[in-house]
Amino acid sequence: MTTVAEAFARAGEDDRAALIGYLPAGFPTREGSVRLMSAMVRGGVDVVEVGLPYSDPLMDGPVIQEAVGIALREGTTPADVVEIAGEVARTGAATLVMSYWNPIERFGAARFADSLAAAGGCGVITPDLTPEEAQEWQEAAEACDIDRIFLVAPSSTDERIRRVADSCSGFVYAASTMGVTGARATVSDAAEDLVARVRRATALPVAVGLGVSTGDQAAQIAAYADGVIVGSAFIRLVLEAPDLPAAEAAVEGLARELSAGVRRRRDTALS
């Protein structure tokens, strides 16, 4: 199993940011999601976020909502998500689960952490869980050496950033924009300032998500962040593909473009 710390350390040794890719488990099918996430890893993704489909994804934009809806109609359960994460972990990428809190709470926090660790997963991102409400999850995750990853946003105060960062392990997820997820033509200028503020509060790596869809955008963010997170851009390619093999090729191709982008960080920073 590759841990989050190992993935970021390897990227740092290459003088680049880590590339993090997201896809929902069970989208477009159970087998298909494993094949697509494996294609992301072949293309250069260092860390995979396996999305846990949820029926009320309030923080997600229309592209992710459509993919999650497909996964739910496929009957994807939290237990399936854990199994899929285990299969993806065998590719050698650090493998996380991205989930709203409600499904984990209903599954059982300790049971979920234990199952994920046994499968080979190494962390969980909980976008709607605040540190103040996370004691049960913190204890369960720590007992299984599962990283806890919380979010900060441009609106977060410095005090709030410190509180969130103190509760994180693995890395801090910096949402570059306010609002729902989705690929954008440009990346928010607030992201660089947010990363600088987080770095004043913690030595953990800082990864930026929400909006990245091209290699140029990845290079832009990699010039100041430790990780670049991409989700909706991968999903859109799958939705537009005529079949699974075409989707695999498209996903791997975008991963290669993004991987090349994070390796341009030094040139971008100096330009």
Image (cartoon, rainbow, N blue to C red):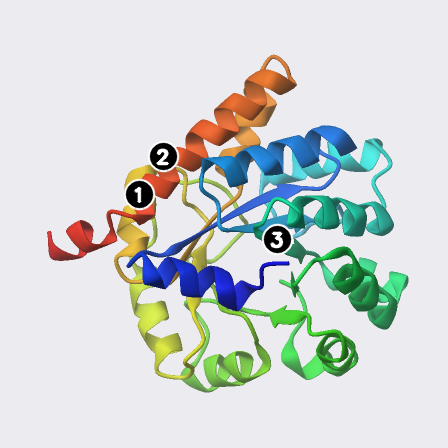
Q: Secondary structure at mark 3?
A: loop
Q: Which residue extends farthest left? A: 271
Distance from Cα at disc 3 to Cα at disc 2? 27 Å
Give left or right: position of 73 versus 9: right
Q: Is residue 225 visible in this depiction of the protein?
A: no
Cβ atoms under marks 1 and 2 closer than 8 Å: yes
Q: Secondary structure at mark 2?
A: helix
Q: Is residue 74 visible in this depiction of the protein?
A: yes
Give left or right: position of 186 versus 126: left
Distance from Cα at disc 1 to Cα at disc 2? 6 Å
Instruction: Decide: is 228 above or below 165.
Output: above
Instruction: Decide: is 247 above or below 90.
Output: above
Q: Residue at x 30, y 64 (%)?
A: 192
Q: Residue at x 52, y 26 (%)?
A: 237
Foreground residue, 155 or 104? 104
Residue 43: percent from left, percent from top: 46, 36
Q: Residue at x 72, y 44 (%)?
A: 87
Foreground residue, 86 or 242? 86
Q: Quadrant of residue 208?
A: bottom left
Distance from Cα at disc 1 to Cα at disc 3? 27 Å
Q: Secondary structure at mark 1?
A: helix
Give, as a three-letter code, the residue at label 3: Met
Front disc: 1 or 3: 1
Label 2, on which residue? 257
Q: Find residue 261 and name its label.
A: 1
Label 3, on which residue? 59
Residue 36: percent from left, percent from top: 61, 32
